[in-house]
Image: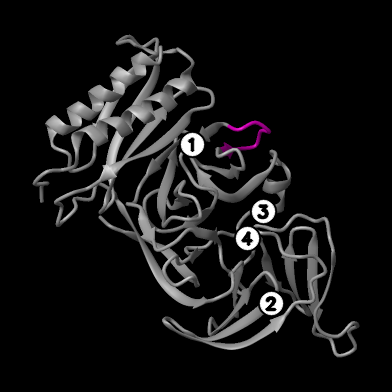
Amino acid sequence: MHLSRAADAGSLEDAVRALARRVGAALHGAQVTYDAQNRSSLNPTEFASVSAAFEDELQRQGVKVVTADSGTPVLVTVTQSPTQYLAVAQIQRKENPETLLETLGSVKGLTEPASSFSLELHRELLFSQDTPILDVFFDSDSTTAFVLGPQEISSYTGQSEHWTLASSERLPRRQAPARVERGFFAFGIDMASAEFPNELCQMYFLPDAKPKGWHCEKDATAVRVRGVSSEASDGNKRGAWLSSAQIEADGKIRLVITGQDGQARLYDDGGEPIATFSGWGGEIAAVHSDCGSGWQLLVTSTNDWTKPDAIQAVEFRDRRAVPVSAPMEFPGPIVALHTPGTRAVDPAKPTAQALAVDHNLQTGRYEAYLLSINCAH
């Protein structure tokens, strides 16, 4: 199905020029070879206009486009979700390659959007509540879910779309929760624990355990990230980070970290990043599926917490982040995205599902979803 009128050409060109300025700032006047690919429903004339605008703006920024192999390769790919066009610019340096993303504008007049992506994101709404959700941990039979909030532990019973709140217990925390709180909930053989930045709450199950019930104390140990081994995270501490995920790419175990500076960085065994990515939000999660390369990274958009959010799957190929699914839109910002907990899985092992929590801007409630990957083609 083709567009009756794809989108306002001027707005598309303005947006792609903004992307070109970001690329120009990253290249600092270097020589480049430029190529563009159309994986959207833009017709050839519209795509040629967008591509020409990008190249023109790049040269306005002092970047010289050459035809010889001596320039740094820059590849721009235009893709789309059911509602938005997306441009992905890949600066293919041998050292520290970089990927930047820019939303170009809304798709108009499209009743059956053509998908150029090989994978599809699937989501299942678990439950919603008025208070924030930091982590979800499933019991071994998956009929009980424990939900960690900033100041309480709640339990839900049920399966699929029929979960019911069973209980809620307040945690005796000694410090006030942060405005943007993080947490990790775990069950051991004889205890349960709730980890927060600089605070640990525990409850022992043994009959003679003291103290009884939950107790909290200061703790400087970093909050664990499910799906990331301690060896990987300890060896790659790089400033103030927001989220991390461990994946396998090009036959190697690699770590992705999003920083408070708005950049995402890809690490292998070394201490320095082997690639840097822009245009992602702060929340990421790894999914180990049977689709594509077998490993996908779920990334959020750069919208702030006053706007709806989106999650998209990417794969890493030769240090490049390649979008492999259309963005899945949510009715509010994604405030948590990571591997869910379960008694049956090693906490350092990624699973085929990710937990996403959004703050619905219409209802004001926090919604927990399970995300998975479907092989579209």
Mark identifier at residue 229: 3
Residue in view at x 36 percent, y 36 percent:
88
Magenta segment range? 265-273
Within 10 Å of the Cα at label 3, are there few (<14), some (14-19), or many (20+) other Cα atoms? Answer: some
Label 4 vs 2, first from the N-terminus: 2
Secondary element under disc 2, as helix, strand or loop, is strand
Q: Nearer the viewer, mark 1 or mark 2?
A: 2
Image coordinates of residue 336 in percent, x first then y, are 55, 60
Label 3 vs 2, first from the N-terminus: 2
Mark identifier at residue 226: 4
Could you tell me how far apart the alpha carbons at marks 1 and 4 are, in whole angstroms?
24 Å
Secondary element under disc 4, as helix, strand or loop, is loop
In this image, 22 relative to 96: left or right? left
Mark identifier at residue 152: 2
Secondary element under disc 1, as helix, strand or loop, is loop
Residue type, mark 1 in image: Ser
Residue indicated by mark 1:
278
